[in-house]
Amino acid sequence: MQNYKTSLSGHIYRILNIVFLCFIANSYFFLDCLGMPLLHILCVAVFILINIFPSVAKRGYNSLRLRMCCHGSELLIYFVSALTFSAALNIYTVFILMPEHWLKWTLNLVICVIYESVIFWNGIISVYLTSVQLGIKIRIVGLLCGWIPIVNLFVLGKIIKITSKEVNFEIGKANLNKSRSSERICATKYPVLLVHGVFFRDSKYFNYWGRIPKELELNGAKIYYGNHQSASSVEDSAAELSAKIQEIIRTTGCEKVNIIAHSKGGLDCRYAISKLKMDKYIASLTTINTPHRGCGFADYLLNKVSPDIKNSVANKYNNTLKHFGDKNPDFLAAVSCLTQEYCNKFNEEIKDSPSVYYASVGSKLNRCSSGKFPLNFSYLVVKNFDGNNDGLVSEKSFRWGSDYQFITVTGKRGISHGDMIDLNRENIYEFDVREFYVQLVSKLKEMGF
């Protein structure tokens, strides 16, 4: 996936704006305000225009959020450029004009600070409100270090780098989708059913699958959700999913569905296919980071932790999950289905259907600090029991079916259990999760599913 490259006209527009701002911010030096009032009014008008339109309009933005993020990022670039020029100019002129023209220098400094402040606050508020990639950590660091000279410039440079990359990346994706829109590469014969994992629910307010569904729909896919309870046994979850599949088929007449299931959802779907006779309604099952061979850490928790602690944790989880829509959540039943003991028995009893195409995907973190909470804590524990893992599931547990993909990246980061469903909406270097799913569904279309 290539980032959007700023056009020549965009670079020229940016340079001209920087030149204008350097001139306007120090206009008291360059203009005789009493003798040239019209030119000063023109400077104010240009300044307002730059604050409203800091970049070349309509470069391929696909949302108001992205336009505002670009707006803020450009203004911060202008702020740093104009601030550097203004600081050098004022330091130089203070030795020339002072003390003879100290009043003129002071007035210019006041005007300069006002202009620079407007540019800065316009830019920083815009990116703080609209950037997805800044994250909470950088925002907090920016607030804490914003009043520390020199340090604040380094932090600001980091903010500009992150938001500029975000804008260019999103514009590049928008242009890619536009160039292939007529191909509808994700318009599969059968609709796609997305099945979530344990301890989460499908919600219209916070999509479990992040930005993935929208990307698939932009490329022609028809998307449905499992919308089953977040914490249940495999058997109960499979029953809910079976009812959902039959509902989709009954209301749309689609005959079958393609399932993409994450984590425990993969086990739920395998059970529904084999034991509940859903194979006649399912064309393909692609499992994402599913613990097909269980998690050793789950065995340890259930066998070593005292009953009092287990029951206390389970009750707290169950009570919390009820607030998110679950009618009868069962934390311990869900965890019990993730043990190696359960999965070994499960794999002996649950046989694949010859009429269903099975594929699987797995990934791993390269170090604990790369995972978001709580995966950064669980990674080391799981590694102690099961070796390389994604923060929850061992690498050796992912593979299932005739087609297997293992996702990793160079460097220290890696790809976590949550990254595989775009849980944190993070643009990861070397792994475009949205495009990964586009290509995954595109392959299903090519196979006739």
Image: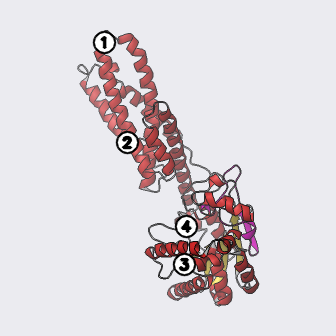
* The quadrant where residue 179 appears: bottom right
Q: CA distance from mark 4 to mark 3?
A: 12 Å
- Check the picture and name the quadrant holding the C terminus: bottom right
SS label for mark 3 = loop
Q: CA distance from mark 1 to mark 3?
A: 74 Å
Q: Is residue 215 left or right of residue 44?
A: right
Q: Residue at x 53, y 39 (%)?
A: 8
Q: Earlier in the sequence, mark 4 or mark 2?
A: 2
Residue tagged 2? 122
Q: Is residue 43 left or right of residue 388?
A: left
- Within 10 angstroms of label 3, few (less than 14), some, or many (20 or more) residues? many
In the displayed structure, would residue 238 be above or below residue 365? Answer: below
Q: Residue at x 39, y 37 (%)?
A: 120
Q: Which mark is residue 64?
A: none
* The quadrant where residue 102 appears: top left
Q: CA distance from mark 4 to mark 2?
A: 32 Å
Q: Position of residue 44 (x, y in %)?
A: 30, 32
Residue tagged 3? 226
Q: Magenta includes 424?
A: no
As shown in the figure, which amino acid type bears the numbered disc 1?
His
Residue tagged 4? 209
Q: Position of residue 93 (x, y in %)?
A: 39, 15
Q: Earlier in the sequence, mark 4 or mark 1?
A: 1
Q: Is residue 242 left or right of residue 303?
A: left
Residue tagged 1? 101
Q: Can residue 290 be seen at all in this image of the molecule?
A: no
Q: Position of residue 67 (x, y in %)?
A: 43, 50
Magenta region: which residues? 392-419
SS label for mark 2 = helix
Q: Earlier in the sequence, mark 2 or mark 1?
A: 1
Q: Residue at x 67, y 68 (%)?
A: 289
Q: CA distance from mark 2 to mark 3?
A: 42 Å
